[in-house]
Image (spheres, rainbow, N blue to C red):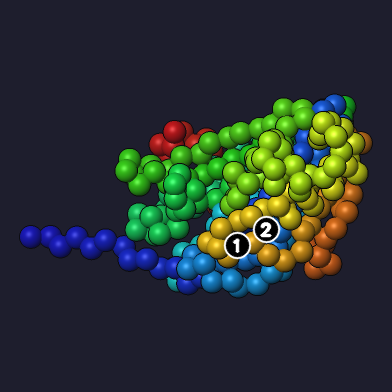
Amino acid sequence: MVALFLPAPVRLQVTGGSLVVWIVSQRSDYVVIGAESRNTDKHLNVLNDRACKIISLGNDTLFYETGNSEIWVQRGLPWSSRDAARSVYSSSPKHDATSLSAAWATNAVRWFYAQPELDLRGLSEPPHGNLVTGGFINFDKNGFLTIRTEEVSFNADKRQLIAQASTQAPGQVGVSGVGLDLVKEFFIGKTPRAARAFGPIGIVRLIGVYAAGDVENIRKAFRFVLDNASEEEKKFLGGDIDIAIIRNDRTIEWIARKSWCYEQDQETTNLPKQNAFDGPLSTLGVY
């Protein structure tokens, strides 16, 4: 008889992001994006309110993240969502958001694919089994906007890793993390509390019309979520709100940002070379 031993969980520490909200202008000439700053571990303990969930790559691209941001392991390579973003940006011949997000998702799936199934079950978040979400925003030299988000999840029933992409059309709002229903409620504005939070501007709700207005819309959306989230959701939310505007002239303007987050833009990846993008998702049996 041959004894089979299943790999045991080897996590040392996990930090996770929570809420990112962005607005695409109606003319696709800018995107405003905001994120709060709380880091939690997989046991929902608050680690700090200092997280940088939006970073700049090459001064022309924004990367944003929620989910399991960083995972340290006792054996093998750690996972870092931001390091993966830096890695694919530096190694990819194409810097459009679609190519970058696809490469980032492949990088993420390769790492999670190598982990024990028990770990994947412990790291995935109900109801959809989300492991990590990341997205890229940039404009090309002709001022054409590309924006794409990738969500990597684990389907425990089918024992499959799944990478699913999404994007937003002009004038639409994107959101990742906790409080999704509250963000949707705020921007639709049909409930009395959402109408009060949006403010007395009559029947016209100006979303995606001008950048300064959308900066305020982002701030109000976060206040609405913080005021109305459940006690469980509030464990994920806290700290300052970082807000950036990326425009079709390929500039990035930080409206609000923690001072130490600028250092994140200048960091190089700590991932080994073999962890960089080097093949399609299909080679891993991902659907």
Dot 1 alpha-carbon crowd within 10 angstroms: few under 14, some 14 to 19, many 20 or more: some
Element type at mark 1 = helix
Task: Give 8 or 257, whichever is nearer the viewer.
Answer: 257
Dot 2 alpha-carbon crowd within 10 angstroms: few under 14, some 14 to 19, many 20 or more: some
Identify whether 92 is placed above or below 66: above
Give the Cα distance between marks 2 and 1.
Answer: 7 Å
Q: Given the current orientation, which residue lies at the most extreme left position?
A: 1
The residue to which callout 1 is attached is 234
In what quadrant of the picture does the N terminus appear?
Answer: bottom left
The residue to which callout 2 is attached is 226
Q: Picture coordinates of residue 105 (x, y %)?
A: 57, 43
User: For residue 216, which numbered disc appears in the image?
Assistant: none
**Residue 92 visible:** no
Q: Picture coordinates of residue 64 (x, y %)?
A: 69, 49
Q: Residue at x 84, y 67 (%)?
A: 259
Q: Picture coordinates of residue 143 (x, y %)?
A: 87, 29
**Type of amino acid under label 2:** Leu
Quarter-of-image position of residue 223:
bottom right
Q: Picture coordinates of residue 265 (x, y %)?
A: 79, 58
Task: Give 20 or 202, whichever is nearer the viewer.
Answer: 202
Which of the two discs, 2 and 1, labels the residue nearer the N terminus?
Answer: 2
Q: Residue at x 58, y 65 (%)?
A: 235
- Whether the residues at callouts 2 and 1 have beta carbons within 8 Å, the answer is yes
In what quadrant of the picture does the C terminus appear?
Answer: top left
Identify whether 277 is placed above or below 248: below
Q: Residue at x 60, y 73 (%)?
A: 47
**Type of amino acid under label 1:** Lys
